[in-house]
Image: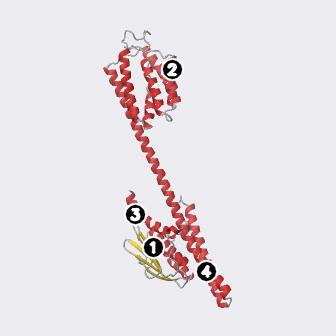
């Protein structure tokens, strides 16, 4: 912009000079000589540094403006130079410098022009180096109002810039938060999908190897075949869910994923795989027939049961191990509790490197629910969660 202002101000001042010469005027103005052009160029060059050094740039433009007006050149568009300098100075945060410097400069210009100012008889005769007009009440009032207007515009520009910067910062923060939440959600989904099915595969593979080594008879072969069939089913399920997660990632711009999302309607398959892995699973499901759960609580409930059974398989110790899955549907919430009577080492703490409990806690917290996990009275471990069915709607209301 400063490079455009130079030719524009110069040409505009020459035009204003011609108009002043062609029309009667109580005071004559100085012709725009090389010194005047040099002042315009000095102000334009100073504006080039208005962002990197706003205070020195504004000071140079202020000095140039005082000299220009004291030389009594035609105004034309020259006031654009101090206007741009003040807007840049206020926008950079130097508000006190802008207001104080402007009014000190205005007071100094008024005092000097009153001291050395000339009247109509001496204007245009070339006898004064600074043939500035002696200030009048009307002229001083107009100059003061113009200065206030320029500073007010500068403040408005600053406010708009700060609001725009704040809005941009909020958008960036929301984008970072959304990206972080998406990464956490993807990590939880992948952990739940892989951990459960790989654990089942690991257990059944160990059973099959043991049977093939210790019981090569037909009975052992039949049991090994059952274990291998369970491995095949678990690996198939893992591949299916992996494709579902990857499909969601690939189709983020579409209205809905192409693969079904896991939910409590697949709970029987999940419990069946856990029983195949050697757990004695007892289920108490209190879900009204035809009841429809919101997608968030439905998926979270399924994943909590899945991760809990995975942890029992890993950490409950030697069998036989019993697991009790209890799901109760309320008017405004759904309760999930998974107990076991395992005699192995206590379940891993959340700070031990495992992410199962941490992931479940995050799921529940995201829906505004309550989560707890710890040793069960009498031995074993308990995972319990309560999920509000109106969690997503309540979160949207709070956001509004």
**Label 3: which residue?**
393
**Label 2: which residue?**
37
Q: Are marks 3 and 1 in contact (CB under 8 Å)?
A: no
First in sequence, mark 3 or 4: give its number: 4
First in sequence, mark 2 or 1: give its number: 2
Residue 43 on image: x %, y % = 49, 26
First in sequence, mark 4 or 2: give its number: 2
Residue 387 on image: x %, y % = 41, 70
SS at badge 1: strand
SS at badge 2: helix
Closer to viewer: mark 3 or mark 2: 2
Q: Crowding at label 1, few (<14), some or many (≥20) Cα neighbours within 10 Å? A: some
Q: Quadrant of the C terminus?
A: bottom left
For the point 65% across and 86% down, the residue is: 211
SS at badge 4: helix
Residue 382 in which image quadrant: bottom left
Closer to viewer: mark 3 or mark 4: 4
346 up-or-down from 29: above or below: below
Closer to viewer: mark 2 or mark 1: 1
**Label 4: which residue?**
204
**Label 1: which residue?**
373
Q: Crowding at label 4, few (<14), some or many (≥20) Cα neighbours within 10 Å? A: many
Residue 259 in which image quadrant: bottom right
**Closest to the observer: 22 or 230?**
230
Closer to viewer: mark 1 or mark 4: 1
Between the C-alphas of marks 2 and 1, the distance is: 81 Å
């Amino acid at each position: 912009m400063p490079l455009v202002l130079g030719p524009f101000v110069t040409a505009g001042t020459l035009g204003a000079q011609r108009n002043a010469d062609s029309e009667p005027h109580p005071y004559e103005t100085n012709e725009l000589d090389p010194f005047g052009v040099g002042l315009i160029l000095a102000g334009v060059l100073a504006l080039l540094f208005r962002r990197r050094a706003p205070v020195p740039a504004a000071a140079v433009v202020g000095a140039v403006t005082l000299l220009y007006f004291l030389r009594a050149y035609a105004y034309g568009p020259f006031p654009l130079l101090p206007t741009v300098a003040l807007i840049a100075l206020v926008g950079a945060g130097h508000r006190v410098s802008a207001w104080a410097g402007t009014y000190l400069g205005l007071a100094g210009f008024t005092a000097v022009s009153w001291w050395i100012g000339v009247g109509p008889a001496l204007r245009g005769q070339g006898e004064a180096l600074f043939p500035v007009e002696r200030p009048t009440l009307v002229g001083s009032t107009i100059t003061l109002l113009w200065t206030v207007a320029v500073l007010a515009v500068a403040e408005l520009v600053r406010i708009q810039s700060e609001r725009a910067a704040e809005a941009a910062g909020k958008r960036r923060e929301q984008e970072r938060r959304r990206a972080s939440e998406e990464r956490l959600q993807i990590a939880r989904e992948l952990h739940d999908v892989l951990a459960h099915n790989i654990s089942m595969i690991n257990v059944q593979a160990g059973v099959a190897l043991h049977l093939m080594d210790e019981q090569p008879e037909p009975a052992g072969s039949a049991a090994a075949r059952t274990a291998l069939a369970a491995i095949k089913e678990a690996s198939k399920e893992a591949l299916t869910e992996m494709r579902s997660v990857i499909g969601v990632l690939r189709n983020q711009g579409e209205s809905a994923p192409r693969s079904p999302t896991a939910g409590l309607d697949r709970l029987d398959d999940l419990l069946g795989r856990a029983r195949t892995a050697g757990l004695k699973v007892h289920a108490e499901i209190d879900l009204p027939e035809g009841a429809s759960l919101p997608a968030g609580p439905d998926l979270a409930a399924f994943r909590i049961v899945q991760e809990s059974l995975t942890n029992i398989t890993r950490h409950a110790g030697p069998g036989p191990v019993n697991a009790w899955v209890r799901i109760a549907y309320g008017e405004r919430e759904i309760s999930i509790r998974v107990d076991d009577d395992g005699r192995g080492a206590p379940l891993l703490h959340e700070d031990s490197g495992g992410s199962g409990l941490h992931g479940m806690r995050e799921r529940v917290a995201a829906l505004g629910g309550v989560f707890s996990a710890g040793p069960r009275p009498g031995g074993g471990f308990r995972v319990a969660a309560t999920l509000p069915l109106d969690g997503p709607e309540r979160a949207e209301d709070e956001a509004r």
